[in-house]
Image (cartoon, rainbow, N blue to C red):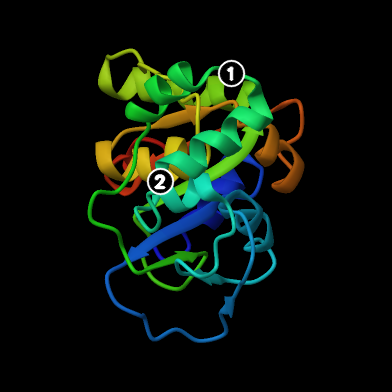
Amino acid sequence: MDRINWRFSDKFGSHWIKVKFYKEKPKLKEVRRLKNVMFCEATKKAIIQPIILDKDSISCLGAQYAFGWKPDKKRLLETCQSKTQASIANLKSMLSRAPRFRKPFKYIGLNTEGIPDLIMTYTSAQEIMNLTRLYQRHTGKNLDILLPGMMTICGGIAVKTYLEGRITISFGCVDSRNFADLRREFIAVGIPKDLWNIFID
């Protein structure tokens, strides 16, 4: 399972990224510690080289909030309002439902060695359809999706997939479209480790 992302890439295409949350600093080889990046931006960089992130790595207030590192609601709401022109009341409502860690992890690994907590990718609607069909065939259930309105990749994919232990899907946000190479025809998806057996024999 160490190369689970490669197995998903072979079967479904696109680059799959391993995401691992660490309580303490891991002893890893050949990893790059990034500074001043957005989480979604870091997922793109992890395709080339394994990445390690901590609270000082992330420049995005939304990701800081989602990962429980810097829950500055006032500043986050002001930043979101300037980007979206939505009312503070509506943003507060969305933020109250946004997934986030109450007890933050100290580090996040992207494509680091070992078995991750989840894998994620940016892929086409057709591949999402293929994943959904396999899920339905295996479980006999529909794949219920609640699309996040804020922190769509960091919170809506990484945190939500981990906390809820279920498949998550997101259309992304303006920042992820710009910084993570989430092209107009792509959709983000996250799959927790307990569900990999549905898709990979």
Q: Is residue 196 visible?
A: no
Residue 4: percent from left, percent from top = 45, 56
Q: Position of residue 135 (x, y in %)?
A: 37, 24
Residue 162 in the figure: left or right of residue 183: left
Q: Is residue 150 left or right of residue 138?
A: right
On screen, residue 117 above or below 2:
above
Asked if 15 appears above or below 156 in the picture, the reply is below
Helix, strand or loop at label 1? It is loop
Q: Quadrant of residue 185?
A: top right
Count of all numbered marks drawn on residues in the image: 2
Furthest toward the left, the residue is 103
Looking at the rendered structure, the kind of residue marked 1 is: Ala
Q: Nearer the viewer, residue 80 or 78?
A: 78
Q: Nearer the viewer, residue 142 or 52?
A: 52
Dot label at residue 145? none
Residue for point 37% across, 44% down: 159
**Quarter of the view holding residue 87:** top right
Quick one: label 2, few (<14), some, or many (20+) residues within 10 Å? many
Mark 1 neighbour class, 10 Å CA radius: few under 14, some 14 to 19, many 20 or more:
few
The residue under label 1 is 86
Task: Judge left or right: residue 103 versus residue 89.
Answer: left
The image quadrant where one finds the C terminus is top left
The secondary element bearing badge 2 is classed as helix
Task: Name which residue lies at 53% across and 40% down.
Answer: 153
Q: Amino acid at mark 2?
A: Ala
Does residue 191 appear in this view? yes
Identify the residue under disc 2: 66
Vertically, is 129 above or below 62? Answer: above
Query: In 3D space, how far apart are the residues under numbered discs 2 and 1 (Cα atoms)?
Result: 20 Å
Residue 62, relative to residue 112: is it above or below? Answer: above
